[in-house]
Amino acid sequence: MRMEPIKTIEWIADQPKRLVPGMIRLVDQTRLPGELILMETRDLRQVWTAIKTLQVRGAPAIGIAAALGVVVAVQDSRAATGAALATEVEQAADYLATSRPTAVNLFWALDRMRLRARADSRRAPADLKARLIEEALAILKEDLAMCRAIGRHGAGLLKDGQTVLTHCNAGGLATSQFGTALAPIYMAQEQGKHIRVYADETRPLLQGARLTAWELMRAGIDVTLICDNMAAQVMKAGRIDLVMVGADRIAANGDSANKIGTYGVAVLAHAHRIPFYVLAPSSTFDLKLTTGDAIPIEERGAEEITCGFGKRTAPEHVKVYAPAFDVTSARLITAIICERGILKPPFGKAIKKAVDRRL
Amino acid sequence: MRMEPIKTIEWIADQPKRLVPGMIRLVDQTRLPGELILMETRDLRQVWTAIKTLQVRGAPAIGIAAALGVVVAVQDSRAATGAALATEVEQAADYLATSRPTAVNLFWALDRMRLRARADSRRAPADLKARLIEEALAILKEDLAMCRAIGRHGAGLLKDGQTVLTHCNAGGLATSQFGTALAPIYMAQEQGKHIRVYADETRPLLQGARLTAWELMRAGIDVTLICDNMAAQVMKAGRIDLVMVGADRIAANGDSANKIGTYGVAVLAHAHRIPFYVLAPSSTFDLKLTTGDAIPIEERGAEEITCGFGKRTAPEHVKVYAPAFDVTSARLITAIICERGILKPPFGKAIKKAVDRRL
């Protein structure tokens, strides 16, 4: 039996032949890895809470949840006109935008829903509702296509029997399915290749232990969990053929911001002559940033480190430094893989071309 | 007020003018950092349990606890002769040796106590008891002198205002006081230098968070706790002037085995041109090992990673790789500091000389 990664977020229509009304079904990621709870909702407030409390996480998955959230908000509306319905769309979008105020993908997806509502506000309400769910599902399908494209390009780099190290979770759980950094592994599996994975647990929030290990195991992929500080030893022992990680933001020169610890893995990979790949959608490129030096390093709360496991494991009042992410210099990156293809250094030209094709 | 590191283990005589009878007072390290519990005991079984359950930990501290454990075992003995008392010493030592079967320092300290008992078995029991406590306190004093010597040599490398990164706990809590890797920091403080420390939390058992951060804070030293995967970012940001770590075992060429994660820190320090120092007593040198390749990498149980602090944070049945330590190649080590002085590369000759002076 071929296994595939779980669908992180889906739309379940009430009737087979009509897309609306329906409900959102999503994997409650706060319950993983202990329990697989599929949360089903047709309630706007619940969608807001799901985004706020990280039941759904990962930029692409948040965008999809928000777009579908707009649909559940208005699908039972009794608005008499398309224009009135479009106003309800704006209100729902405004509300959802407050769930995670720094999530760029959230705003982008909500803006697409607003634009659709405005463009079609002269239609009958039923017709506009159909257009809205189509728009939201288009966002989902585009994400799926993006993940599969990144996966296909990346899978070409994987030989049967190889072992990949990954950090954090740029997996299916961060997108609709398949993910970015993990997509090549799933695609290679589809191609019949046997790929092994080492997953950094990724302190402080343990996304590697909780999410990456879980989704890979569930898809039947051979995954071994390690603490972050074991990656060097695993590389030294010759167990790793290549590193694949995601990115939150990539500067024009290829410098890549990602979860804290990624930069350290890149330095270690470089020292052990192991190829280091960054996998992310082309929407991650930010040409306004000349280099990664311009990216401010956000800091997180100390409690994530001092009380990580429900139990206090550090002295009261200890000073903590908790950067949320770090920036990997382009010179440490073997290639950047986006849905447009494999970009090789020097990255400047290749990134510009990938962005231009996107526009 | 000048602060100094806590005494990890002490002997408290019942009367001011006689060393025996008395009791052992030790910091219960299983209760840190939440509570500072000074456990006082004159009971052999309790000493055995303290070693077994890591209430006392770190090779030197374990050796001292065991030697004092022999004293509490026999101090109230009514043996009629020194020879009979010496037999009780052998029995107590045999029993204590079962507490942690791989702790070399434990056996070494117990053997010293056996030899003392045998050598003085013709003395009167009261006299032999006095000789035994003197031997045990000699082990403690030698440890203290060793720590202070390492500290003095190391403090010479520290300039006022500098920042040290350390990994795990090679601090006062692993010895009688002061420690090895942390001794230079305490000595520099005595000299009036202001030294800052970054402490890796050190997964899976968090000795950095629980012990290093605690003992440095308690001694009034400016310490900042980070997750292991943040060390690279902290180095990149220019916050670290040098790295100081301990060692469990050092091969004839300088390759050094220490807590998992140390090797990764060494690679990162090298990449950022930050000096990397190993600090350990000369008893750590093992000339039977030509290089570190001969050191087998012990693996620990998966539960330490998957259920770190009472809560399961990884999927059931996930495969785990959990090396207990790693080996840092001599080429990554700027200098090795032992009680004999600062050894510089190539280490082979310097290590041999330090060992020869010791014999």
Image (cartoon, coloured by chain):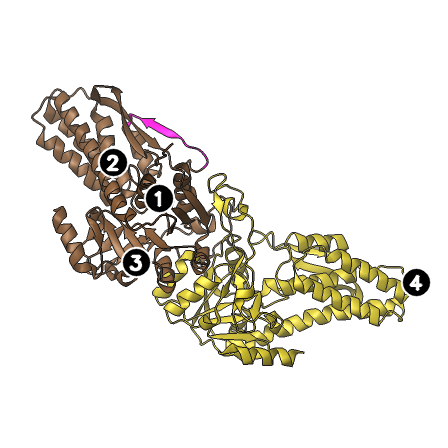
Chain colours: A brown, B yellow
Q: Which residue is mark 3?
A: A327
Chain at tag 4: B
Q: Main secondary structure of the magenta part?
A: loop
Q: Secondary structure at mark 4?
A: loop
- Of tags 1 and 2, the one toward the viewer is 1
The dot on residue A64 is: 2
The dot on residue A218 is: none
Q: Which residues are magenta?
A: A34-43
Indicate yes or no whether the magenta region holds residue A63. Answer: no
Type of amino acid at the residue the image marks with label 3: Val
Q: Secondary structure at mark 2?
A: helix
Type of amino acid at the residue the image marks with label 4: Ala
Q: Residue furthest left?
A: A122
Which image quarter: residue B107? bottom right
Q: Earlier in the sequence, mark 3 or mark 2?
A: 2
Do the residues bearing badges 3 and 2 touch, measured as CB atoms within 8 Å? no
Which image quarter: residue B78? bottom right
Counting from the top left corner in percent of width and height, residue A270 is at: 35, 62
Q: Earlier in the sequence, mark 1 or mark 3?
A: 1
Do the residues bearing badges 4 and 3 touch, measured as CB atoms within 8 Å? no
Q: B9 left or right of A68?
A: right
Q: Which residue is mark 1?
A: A193
Q: Which residue is mark 4?
A: B80
Cα gap from disc 1 to disc 3, whole angstroms: 32 Å
Counting from the top left corner in percent of width and height, residue A161 is at: 39, 48
Indicate yes or no whether the magenta region holds residue A35. Answer: yes
